Image (spheres, rainbow, N blue to C red):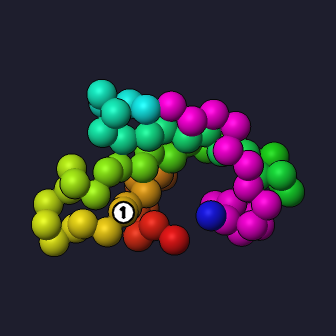
């Protein structure tokens, strides 16, 4: 995953914990290049409708894209 502000690939996960009874994972991330911090939510593919079964990372920003 790349930093959403500087696009650097040096990103560290600082915290990871299950949410929604284990159906998804919340990860706190930090860019080692610019220091920007953000949270991502990773959903289990089984919890999504059939047409969206690829893992999707939901960001705190309003954009969505398939998991890399």
* Image coords of residue 5 (percent x, y): 69, 60
Rendered-image quadrant of the N terminus: bottom right
* Image coords of residue 25 (percent x, y): 44, 40
Is the residue 64 above or below the residue 43 in the image?
below
Task: Specify the segment rendered in magenta.
Answer: 2-17
Residue ranking furthest to the left: 50
> Quarter of the image holding residue 38?
top right
Q: Which residue is label 1 attached to? A: 55
- In the drawing, does residue 24 fall left or right of residue 34? left
Q: Evaluate whether residue 31 shows in this view.
A: yes
- In the drawing, does residue 19 fall left or right of residue 2? left
Question: Is 16 contained in the magenta span?
Answer: yes
Q: Residue at x 43, y 57 (%)?
A: 57
Is the residue 23 above or below the residue 21 in the image?
below
Residue ranking furthest to the right: 33
Q: How many marks?
A: 1
Q: Residue at x 55, y 41 (%)?
A: 27
Q: How dense is the environment of label 1, judged by Cα within 10 Å: few (below 14), some, or many (20 and up)? A: some
Q: Residue at x 22, y 67 (%)?
A: 52
Q: Nearer the viewer, residue 60 or 16?
A: 16
- In the drawing, does residue 7 fall left or right of residue 67? right
Is the residue 24 above or below the residue 6 in the image?
above
Q: Nearer the viewer, residue 41 or 53?
A: 53
* Image coords of residue 24 (percent x, y): 36, 41
Tag 1's secondary structure? loop
Q: Residue at x 44, y 45 (%)?
A: 41
> Quarter of the image holding residue 49?
bottom left
* Image coords of residue 30 (percent x, y): 72, 45
Question: Is 59 contained in the magenta span?
Answer: no
């Amino acid at each position: 995953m790349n930093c959403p502000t500087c696009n650097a690939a040096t990103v560290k996960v600082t915290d990871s914990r299950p949410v929604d009874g284990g159906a998804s994972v919340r990860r706190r991330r930090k860019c080692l290049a610019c220091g920007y911090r953000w949270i991502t939510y990773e959903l289990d593919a089984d919890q999504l409708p059939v047409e969206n079964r690829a893992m999707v990372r939901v960001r705190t920003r309003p954009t969505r894209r398939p998991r890399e």
